[in-house]
Image (spheres, grey):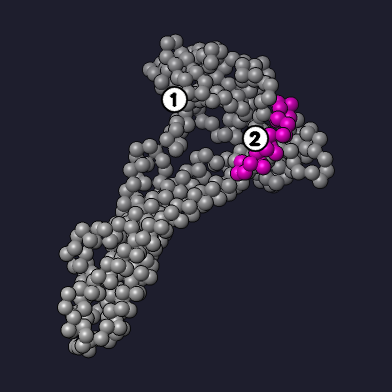
Amino acid sequence: MNTVEAIRIALQSLWANKLRSVLTLLGVVIAVATVIAVETFVNGINGYVAEKIFNLGADVFIVSKAPNVITNLDQFLESEKRKDVHYEDFLAVQEACTACKNVGASIRQDSVRVKYNEQDISDSTARGWTPGMTAIYDLDLQSGRNLSDADVNAGSQVAVIGSDIAENLMAGIDPLGKEIKVNGQTYSVIGVAKPKGKAMGQSQDNWVVIPLTSWMKQFGSQRVSLHIWAKAKGVGTPLEEAIDQVRVVMRSLRHDAPGRPDSFAAETNDSFLSIWADLSGSFFMVAVALASISLIVGGVVIMNIMLVSVTERTREIGIRKALGARPGDILQQFLIESSTLALVGGAIGVLLGIGVAKTVTIAVGMPSEVKVWTVLAGLLMALSVGVFFGVYPAQKAAKLDPIQALRFEL
């Protein structure tokens, strides 16, 4: 029997026993679908994180009291003991970093209420910025202007707003020059940003940017730790040189003893992406481990069904051997059949996993990306299960005595 004939027999067996086939393939389908869906989400989120969230640029770094991503309790407890980063630290870094093209400082307050006339939004973010942040953050405006040094120095009550604020509170009118209230404090709109859309189902345009000094007056400057952002000059001035200059300034200001670790965090785009890759990789491995349980169960079911098939086709095996079929031919036949069963389950699992991922993407906006290697890995995983758990039934069929097989009756 050739390979095509063995595959045809396996497919006929699947179609002739539909309910049994569904139950046989269920474990493989669930396992492959789980792995495909999870990896599709991981691929999509990794790409989105690299492009949208941590896309600071290769020449940008952030200095803060604690790492932006804390991975263990000891790291959290140690960072809580550190001094806050103050406005004076930012001014010192801005003055001393000759290798920096731009230096900015930022702070934020979530869940603020923004009001215009009788309309309001209660879940916005108030960002306190210095002018350097607009160049570092690559903030594009559709109208108006960005913050200036004069705005920060004077603590002006001015604001640049995200497109959500403009569309929801000021639809149909020009926002420039209009007065809005941020948690009851009045600000005059001087700029409107271009929309950026959603990230992980959350809008990136529901915010208000005000001068950092105005932010500190309104929300309080006590126990507030800033983030200092810096952009290296680039050509001829490597990022490491800019980071070293800033580290020298910060260590001096914070009186870090020689030989002691920094009492602050300096992070680049690569460090963010590396941490995220580790987290997403761990998440994927957990999903694979859980899916493996379903895969083993599915493999055991396939083995049992193939044993039943060997029993049902004992006379057929005897006839084939009587006509000259060798044990290797019988072994190959049943291995191909078990592999075909598993591959069909794998194919269904791939389609189901992709379908679930894309449905969630449409419903809640979670990024997903299907990669060819993911599909091939899912099919290979299913094929491996079919081969591994099909060996015992195939060997049993190959070892049958032709005389006894011909005499066998169910």
Q: Are marks 1 and 2 in contact (CB under 8 Å)?
A: no
Q: Write down the residue under mark 1.
A: 164
The local secondary structure at tag 2 comes to strand
Q: Is residue 305 visible?
A: yes
The amino acid at mark 1 is Asp
The local secondary structure at tag 1 comes to helix
Residue in front for this viewpoint, 323 or 132:
323
Q: Is residue 376 visible?
A: no
Percent position of residue 406, x then y: 18, 84
Quadrant of residue 157 in the image? top right
Q: Residue at x 25, y 70 (%)?
A: 308
Q: Residue at x 33, y 58 (%)?
A: 27
The magenta region covers: 70-91
Image position of 233 (left or right of 333) = right
Q: Write down the residue under mark 2.
A: 229
Does 93 appear above or below 318? above
Residue in front for this viewpoint, 316 or 59:
316
Which callout, 1 or 2, points at the residue further toward the start of the chain?
1
Locate the N terminus and report the quarter of the image it occupies: bottom left
Does 275 appear above or below 231? below
Image position of 344 (left or right of 159) = left
